[in-house]
Amino acid sequence: MEQSLNFAEARHLVARTGLGAEWKLIKKLEGRTRQQAVNIVLHPQVYNPPAPPKMTAWHIRMNMHESKNPRHKMKMHAMTTLEGRRLKRWWIAHMRRTPSPLVEKLTLFWHGHFTSSLDKIEQPSLLYKQHMLLRRHALGSFSTLLKGVAKDPAMLVYLDGMLNEKRHPNENFARELLELFTLGHGYYSEHDVKNVARAFTGWSVDRYQERFAFNKEEHDNAPKKVLGKWVKNGDDVIRVLLQHPRTARTIAEKFWSLFINDAEPDSRTIQSWANTFRHSRYNIRTLLGSVFNSDAFWSEENRGALTKSPADLVVGSLRMVPWRTASMFSDKDVEGIFRLLGQDLFDPANVKGWKTGMDWIDAETVMVRSSMINKLTGGNMNARVNKGAGYPDAPPEQYQQWLLAQQPVSSLPETPGKARLVRALALDPVYQLT
Amino acid sequence: MNRREFAKLAALTPFAGMAGIMPELALSAKAEPTGKRILLLVELAGGNDGLNTLIPLKQRKKYEDARPTLAQKKVIDIGEEVGMHTSLEPLKSWWDEGQCSWVQNVGYPKPDRSHFRSKDIWETASSSDQQRADGWLSLVLPEKKQGLHGVVVGSGLGPMQGKQCRAVAMHDPRTFVKQAELVSQADVETSNPSLAHIIDVQQQVHGARQLLERSIRVRHIERFFPHRSNFNNDLKSVAKMIVGGADATVYKVTLSGFDTHAGQAITHKNQLAYLAKGLDAFANAMKVFKQWDNVLVMTYSEFGRSLKENLSGGTDHGTSAPQLVMGGKLKGGKLYGDSPDLNNLDSEGDIQYTTDFHSLYATVAENWWGGENPWTQYETLSFV
């Protein structure tokens, strides 16, 4: 017999699968069985982002870039920066408002997994296209996503695929495909890297259409061995990689860090998730189902065992509580805070993508995190002023359960008042965890 | 300053060294250097054009052919091999006194021309085909001392990245202290490692705050930094911290704007002037406060620039470049390492490094700090 979720369990499910422990969602899931609740979480309504900001076409930018007039070049750089910032804010705005935060969480995860950055690509419209690809398949099929990414123009620029030619193979994409996107370090040889690079030669980009273009002249069509199997082209390589058991494990391990805790993943759990994932032909929703129904996910020991990512902390906080101060955080401000905290959207620091777990926390980010919470929870503490603010009608003990994943370590205020209590709880170090 | 004023100041700064408040007094009373070995790293962000910093005189024709508009005709004489860019004039007297030197043509094999990747390679002491997450200083500082390891004035911990390193980044000490006061302070035992890490970092921040509170009160530094620029302000902050006894081993400042793809002639001239004026001011301040012997200044930059100038009157991402070292204890006034050979270029037509940057780190670890040297396979240099 399955028991129904209590408040703390419903809160755990919402906080881990969304952005912030939103009161309404918790209340919606409280009292349902685990399976029912997980099912609701796994089938969010499709909620598409609004139209993107205007972005200059690639070929126009390239013309400016190649111009002999230094002013054109400078103008081009300024334009790229501006359009990039607008794109970042566009996503932030959507994260703050969407009723389906799981889609954002997964899109952000795939953005870290299949990294590309404005810093290198200098072409916002390509990043936007990549973003829509990641979003479309965020809970869909990993194999479709992988195939799409290999032909994605932003990726072809970011990892130099478009420079990968028959006579001058470029190994950048090949190496990261093996090391970061599928198998992981140590499961392939340098020889494999070279042959994978050869197989992907000629995979290029049409600058005018801003889409994948196959350049037959530059493709090395000779058979080559990758992981002991004969391949000719990139499609063959991807097939081989999807047959390899490591690929599913790599994703399963990363989901452990995204959903379970900051420690090393449990090998047997990973094995079971990876099996399910592979046998579902890489259905991401199926993998998520395994994760959210697992004992590891529900174990009391894992409450508060995961460090909040910048998105969890910043967007999560803004979504959770009806702050009067929320208007002090424009999408532009939030974008800046994301950058300071190390989650600069469309600009991950390096090819490894986002940090995870405890690596989010250093002296610099600790200060930015507390400044942000200070500002957000500041203002008038007077209960009368905050009367209509929309704080949930619940006893103080439940506030603690709502805002914190485990017992606070600082002492709580003796003066009553919801605003004061919320502030104290949010400033507690435990609030940085989920 | 009269006696009463002095008493008032002294009361305000119960634990600050007298040097901070009364340099004149300090000179007589506390003339002994403290024996600390401070490293000030100066990042020249964007990729400094080494060939227009130290102008190659021996292959001048080749240099001038490659740079029809950017070649420097006039240089500061520091010998027959190379000449300094005229903007570096303020450094000349330090060179003459043997307290300023250049390590020539510093780089690494298979140079990466991406800003972020090459910066990572330098800052983590890795190589083109190796990724490391932690900064090079995290390999040497933790065993060197307790307490605060380093302070970055600017953003990003860079070479002090990593859990082993106790470093803080700030824009200026005053703001840092104010911000740090907002950070909660819990001192509890916990079996949750994630929580323990947060509490630990929060305590580090408070530790740094206490040390930095002194530097805020340091006076008489302003007059050494008359030029108004961000770089000067950052150096002033560092000077205050050193004089105030902040007790960090490494400081880092950044001078940005070296990515001179277009219209380089003016930009680069200005950048080098900022650099030279700033370091001249800093060195003077350190000298007066009897700290100059305790300080080693060292520059780094993700790469040098292309030998050939481009069609926009600029240069593109290149390979190796000279790095500046300064300090009271420096064996300076001469060049270290070999000059680039403009007749021996790589496949992209750029110069090939002759001194590996790991040698700089090995020198700092072994000769300056006299400690463990993780880079023994690289030669140390004798500038300190």
Image (tube, rainbow, N blue to C red):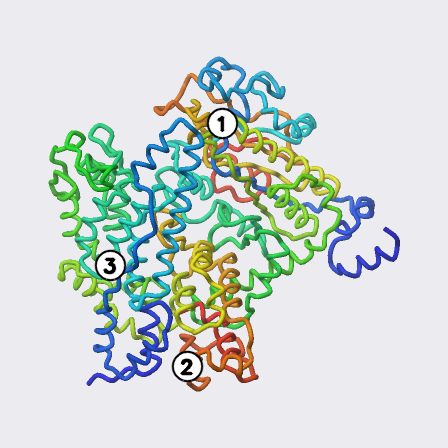
| Location of mark 3 (residue) | A138
Q: Residue furthest top?
A: B61
As helix, strand or loop, the secondary structure at mark 2 comes to: loop
Q: CA distance from mark 3 to mark 1?
A: 47 Å
| Residue A233 versus residue A405 in the image, above or below | above
Q: Pinpoint the chain carrying mark 3.
A: A
Q: Is residue B369 among the parts visible in the rendering? A: yes
Place of residue B332 in the rendered image (x, y in percent of width and height, measured from the top left): 63, 29
The label nearer to you, 2 versus 1, is: 2
In this orientation, does residue B362 appear?
no
Count neighbours of disc 1 (C-alpha within 10 A) and say few if under 14, some if 14 to 19, many if 20 or more: many
A81 lies left or right of A136: right
Q: Which residue sits at x=65%, y=41%?
A: B228
Give the amino acid type for the residue marked by disc 1 in the picture.
Asn
Kind of residue at disc 3: Ala
Q: Earlier in the sequence, mark 3 or mark 2?
A: 3
> Mark 3 and mark 2, same subunit?
yes
Labels 3 and 1 share a subunit: no
Q: Which mark is residue B105?
A: 1
In the rendered image, residues at marks 2 and 1 fall on the same chain: no
Residue B54 position by quadrant:
top right
Question: What amino acid type should be assigned to the residue bearing mark 2?
Answer: Pro
Q: Position of residue B86 (x, y in %)?
A: 61, 24
Residue appearing at x 72%, y 52% in the figure: B218
Q: Please tell me the numbered disc located at residue B242.
A: none
Looking at the picture, how far across and down is residue A276, in whole percent? 16, 64
